[in-house]
Image (spheres, coloured by chain):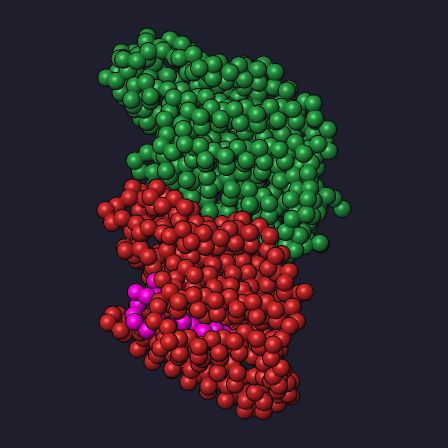
Chain colours: A red, B green
Amino acid sequence: MNALIISAVLGVIMMFGSTLLKQKNSIRALATGGMLLLLLANLLEMGGIRFFQVELKGMLFFDQFALVFHSLLLLAVLLYIILAAPDMEKVGVNYADYFALLFFILCGVAMVLAFKSLLILFLGIEIISIPLYILTGSDKKNLKGNEAALKYFLLGSFSTGLMLMGIALVYGARGTFSTLANPAITPMNLNLLIAGMAFLLFSMAFKVSAAPFHFWTPDVYDGAPTVFTSFMATIVKAAVFVAFVRLFDELFGDFDGKWRLWVAVLTAVTLFIGNITAVFQQSVKRMLAYSSIAQAGFMLFALYAMNGDGKEGLLLYAAAYCFATIGIFAVLARMKDYTFDGFNGMGKTRPFIAAALAVFLFSLAGIPLTAGFLAKFYMLKAALAVPGSAWLVLFAVLMAAVSVYYYFRVLQAMYFREPGETSHPEFPAYFKWVLGAMAALVIVLGVLPELLLGRLYF
Amino acid sequence: MISLFLILFPMAAGMLHFFLKDGKTARSFALFSSLATLVIALLGLTVYSQPEQHSFSRPWLTILGSSFSLQADGMGKVLTLLNAVAYPLVILGTWQRVYAQPGRFFGLMLLAQAGMMGVFLTTDALLFYFFWELALIPMYFLASQWGGERRIPVTFKFFIYTFAGSVLMLAGLLYLQTQTADHSFSMAAFHKLKLHSATQLKLFWLFFVAFAIKMPVFPFHTWQPDTYEQAPAATTMILSGVMVKMGLLGLARWLMPVLPVASYQWGDVVMSLSVIGIIYASLIAIRQDDLKRLVAYSSIAHIGLMSAALFAENLSATQGVMIQMFNHGINIIGLWILIDIIERRYGTRKISELGGIARQAPVLAVFFVVIALANIALPLTNAFPGEFLMFNGILGAKSKYYILFVILAGLGIILAAVYTLNMIRRCFYGEPGTLSAAGGDLQAHEKWVLGIIVGLILWMGIYPQSLLGLSEGFSLQWLERIDISYLFRK
């Protein structure tokens, strides 16, 4: 609850900040300080210290899982703001407003992580989505950005409609919005419930860009300013995934026979389309867009398996994926050339940055001793506990082997090719420190996952 | 503790190398640290040979059912010894090569050594997978950064191939872990598994493909000749001399004792693939003009014989494989060193451009002939006892088709003699070629390296017991583990 209220307040403060503060540096400092405060408040809540006593009427419940996940995401956002805040200046003139929107999104993130009522889920998803539409189109002079924003808005509204329909049907069947209640379902109502479940499945699949509901993703990720793509593809996606898994666990956990096959098909199709299409990309940014689809395929295993390993795996996966992707996007945002050739010879000209990128790429590809490996490992282990899923696991590992192809193309460019004509940008010292710390974090989580997973139970 | 040192020492030395800028310092330090590793390995075989000094176990990743466990059994000892002996020879053998970013080159080489030590020593399946990848990635970087003209696509193919194999293995390991009684990755738990034979028959291929790609066994070999040709000389030596043994070790330690029924059932298929590989690779080797590619294909044939012998499942064949793993490593490193010397001296590896080298460089010729003859298993050289034991073993195999396998594999030996003797004849005798007219004989340090290799060849050829004794206990125990005759007893 701490983080939810503080992020809303911070959003408002940043909005007024744009009129009061003229210096970009002070805006940035305010945002970073606010973010730090937010993380601290959430960590305190994990320790049992609550600043606000609010009667929630059972609509929200901040359990340990939600709090650990939220802390992780807030840490990722903090690192993201430190790395990417200077790049936001290049997007447009409304510098403080971007931060305001980010804080509002975090407010929605807190809601979807801890919802116990379908209304809160809907509110949370909308609070996340609307600022994202704005951020996608924030570079007003860029035609591609405008197109992406409109596309995102139209398709996003459509999926919101589906979701609302699903919620209505589920309400019709259960007679309550609460996910905690356990009303008896009559055979007549069961059909309603299953229809509602299908709508919810499709709309949530849209939000996490699972194939075949992924068509908006490459265009939107490519069209949006790179700094915001990074935010969208990591923090937002991870949060919505938690909502997805919680929704199906709490509401439809008893009917897993009905939806498991659908999720299996979604997973397989997402893995296939994401990985195979990423192979053919020429721009690193677009490759990362498809890679985010492919990684979503792996995260869907948590939904498919719906067991303890799956949830632990989702936490680890979110950590591995967010840190690695934020790191790569932060470097990419400063590059002049977004093609693979733009990275040529970076191992020689910028050895430190290249080494950190190599760690991130290893993690995304699932090479051992990085968090990405253990995350994939957990997902596969969770899936194997479900009888009859050997085919899906085999398919997933083969797709992981395919993913090596496009991640390692960046490595090849950095280490095995000579520098091209376009020079690589200079990276300030603090940037290197933060990037190095993120790379270290990825390795530490890959060697000692207990550090994160242990938090879930204490 | 010895096992732990064998991994940690090269790893620490390798990481230190990344901070070295000067080529000569890096090279000397690499030689020093690889010699130190050799000393540790030798101490482990002599002074500290008690079993408790070879095992090490600490909890790690316990939530996954894994632990950091090392244990040197007979096969582990033979292979760590090979790994420890190979590195000083390789570094000294390519002493005159100059590398861009030498610190990084030698650092990656030593990291690969640490990874392979881990693969040879660990008794935990997850740790095995970690080390498997830890050995692969430095090799990929080495071959891609310092290799020949076509290095990037060629080594990428190698990497993707091997990685695809290893993720299949990972899926298999995960499945096995869920089947164990205590959900652990330990080798002991895996060996206790008694899986249904239908499951075994399917699981077998997940593991076999991974190991077959590594060795490589026909038809998974297509990455190998290109990679050996394009990788820098020192990397090729380690790749072909030591790293391919990871595949054989995988078969012997993680596949056959865990899935004994499937290993028996698929034995004929594997042996067929192996002998097809022997004949196929030997025939291609005859037609090769590039020395490196010739040796690369001959290596496929040798590995094919070893994998066939492993599936013969008897003591003679197993012991043959154990000593041959060591001896093949020594011989092929010797050949690569000679080819590297020829390439540096004459500027070519093409047989058609060489000729008459024996006149200018008689000492080089003598070494070449001895090592090449060892490669085709002439009596009194090290490969002879190994191949003899393996053939003897295949003759005693339970397979219905054993006689066919022996004949075809024997044909491979004849073909090996054809391409090896032909290579010696065309490179060293006859009229001097266009490029081989100039160039002197061996230098002192090259004589030392080759002298040591020839010494090892003769020692192991005359007194193979020194290796056989090391692995005998392991082989006997292993045969007990893969024995499935209890299934037929009523």
Residue A458 position in % (x across, y down) = 68, 65
Question: Which residue is rendered at x = 64% and y = 88% of the image?
Answer: A184
Stretch in magenta: A87-109
In this picture, is A402 found above or below A126? above
Residue B273 position in % (x across, y down) = 48, 39
| SS majority, magenta | helix
The image quarter containing residue B123 is top right
Residue A95 shown in magenta: yes
The image quarter containing residue A62 is bottom right
Question: Which residue is rendered at x = 25% and y = 70% of the image?
Answer: A142
In the image, B432 versus B416, the foreground residue is B432
Residue A377 shown in magenta: no
The answer to whether residue B438 is left or right of residue B266 is: left
In the image, B371 versus A99, the foreground residue is A99
In this picture, is A145 found above or below A326? below
Residue B216 in view, yes or no = no
Question: Which residue is rendered at x = 62% and y = 26% of the image?
Answer: B40
Residue A217 in view, yes or no = yes
Residue B115 position in % (x across, y down) = 54, 38
Question: Which residue is rendered at x = 38% and y = 58% of the image?
Answer: A330
The image quarter containing residue B101 is top left
In the image, A124 versus A299, the foreground residue is A124
The answer to whether residue B357 is left or right of residue A46 is: left
The answer to whether residue B300 is left or right of residue A141 is: right
